[in-house]
Structure formats: structure tokens, C-alpha cells
Image (spheres, rainbow, N blue to C red):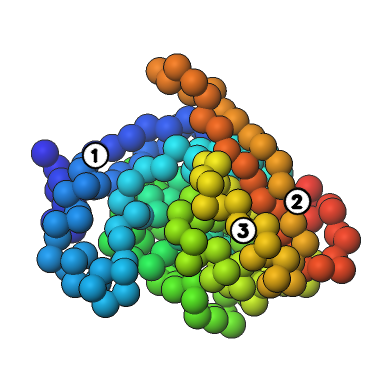
Amino acid sequence: MEAFRGYPVIERTIEVAGRTYTIVGPANFESLLDDPQVIARFDQDEFMPYWAEFWPAATLLAEEVASWPHAAQNSSPTVLEVGCGLGLVGLVLLERGYDVTLSDYDDDALAFVAQSAQRSGLPVPKTAFIDWRETYPQHYSDRIVAAEVLYERRNLDAVARFIQRHLKPAGVALVCDGNRQVADGFRDAARQAGLALCERSTEKTVAGRTTPIRGRIFELRHKGSHDTSTLNRG
């Protein structure tokens, strides 16, 4: 079996809006839990290698951003993907010409994203190591996207505050979640962070699955921002 960065790997081909993407990731997510480096990071920071699993709800956000118009040359909005994991959403944005930075809290995730871009016939993506508990002025963005980052209660306030600090005044953020019960608390976390929130359900039928992938998208803006046209401009 092929290996990359010391991991046996698996390739997935995923179709989004009629375009096929090749996503490369570790073949066995659960085996990473026994990795000495992962154990050491968990002892220090309760870190878990969630980046290494492909979470189906990421396809929901990928379909959402695939509906955005292709970015206009030389005037593309800046987009930051937070907790990119294996990077499907960011690759869709890259294909559509957006000035996108894919970020994660693990260097291995960023290395795999670059591999997936290459195998998908895309340019080398911009990547950044980002801890969403911190602030990064260089990543002040027009749009922020994140899929399946609300998997632990401790993340709710942290993600909401990160968006509040890094989203431009007229910007919009989309956070997609696979209907996890713990993520219900994100509504209050967002409002406490000074963000206006709109929530909507979404689903995607996938060949080979007996039931659709279902989830929800939280759309966030700064309170007082009434620019509803942001997502309709390339």
C-alpha cells in the first residue's frame, strides 16, 4: 500500500457539482490513536487527529461553495477554510478561482491537502497552521468556511470567537455540521460572540448510500451587517 508521511494512504474520488476531486488521506483513522506523537499531543492539549478522517458532511459544504460563481480575475474575495482536514471544501474553492487559504491545527493535514490538490490537477494551495483559539491578523478574510469543526463542546465558543475576530465587517462565514447534538449550542456561542446567525438544513444524495448525507449550515455575519449579496459575487 502506498505511504505518505509515514501513513498508509487511501485515495477517494468525490464528485462535486460535476467535477471529480481526488482526496488522499490515511487509510486507517483509528490506528492514529495509538501513534506516540498523537498520544503525547493528547496529554498536552487533548488533541485528537480528527483531520485524518473524511467526514461526509464536508461534501455538503463543498456543494454549497460550488454554487458560488467563479471568482473574477484580480478581484477574488479572500476565503479562509478553518479546520480543513483533508481539504475537499478548499479544493473546490481553489478550482473556482478563489483566493483561498486552507488551514488546520496539524501539519500532516496540510501536507495531505497539497497532495490532493496535485492529484486533482489543481495549483498548489495556500496553507496555514492555525489554532482557532489564537488570533492571526494576516488572515482577516472576506469569507470563512468550516466543515465538521463543532464536534466537541469546547470548540463552540472558540470557533465563534475566531470567526468574529477574522471576518471582515461585510463578510460572511459558513459553518457546516452533520447535525451533531453538541453543535446545537453553537447558536448561543455565535450570538455571544457578536455574530448574527441564520441556520438552514441541507442534504446530498450520494451513489452507493442508502440514505442522503444530511446536515445544516450556519451562516454568520457581524451583527448590524445587512449585506446579503456577499455570496453572489465572485
Distance of mark 2 from mark 1, alpha carbons?
A: 36 Å
The secondary structure type at the circle numbered 3 is helix
Q: Disc 2 marks which amino acid?
A: Cys
Distance of mark 3 from mark 2, alpha carbons?
A: 11 Å
Distance of mark 1 from mark 3, alpha carbons?
A: 33 Å
The residue at 18%/66% (across/down) is 39
Position of 227 relative to 65 (above/below) = below
The secondary structure type at the circle numbered 2 is strand
x and y percentages locating residue 130 in the rendered image: 44, 72
Query: Nearer the N terminus, badge 1 or badge 3?
Result: 1
Can residue 126 be seen from the camera position used here?
Answer: no
The 10 Å Cα crowd at callout 1, few under 14, some 14 to 19, many 20 or more, is some
Query: Nearer the N terminus, badge 2 or badge 1?
Result: 1
Q: Disc 3 marks which amino acid?
A: Phe
Q: Nearer the viewer, residue 10 or 210?
A: 210
Query: Nearer the N terminus, badge 3 or badge 2?
Result: 3
Q: Which of pointers 2 and 1 indicates the residue nearer the eye? A: 2
Q: Nearer the viewer, residue 129 or 175?
A: 175
Q: Disc 1 marks which amino acid?
A: Ile
Q: Which of pointers 3 and 2 indicates the residue nearer the eye? A: 3
Q: Mark 3 points at which residue?
A: 186
x and y percentages locating residue 64 in the rendered image: 63, 41
Q: Name the residue under label 2.
A: 198
The quarter of the image holding the N terminus is top left
The 10 Å Cα crowd at callout 3, few under 14, some 14 to 19, many 20 or more, is many
Can residue 46 be seen from the camera position used here?
Answer: yes
The residue at 20%/43% (across/down) is 28
x and y percentages locating residue 107 in the rendered image: 31, 67
The 10 Å Cα crowd at callout 2, few under 14, some 14 to 19, many 20 or more, is few
**Residue 103 located left or right of residue 170:** left
Q: Residue 173 carries which label?
A: none
Q: Which mark is residue 10?
A: 1
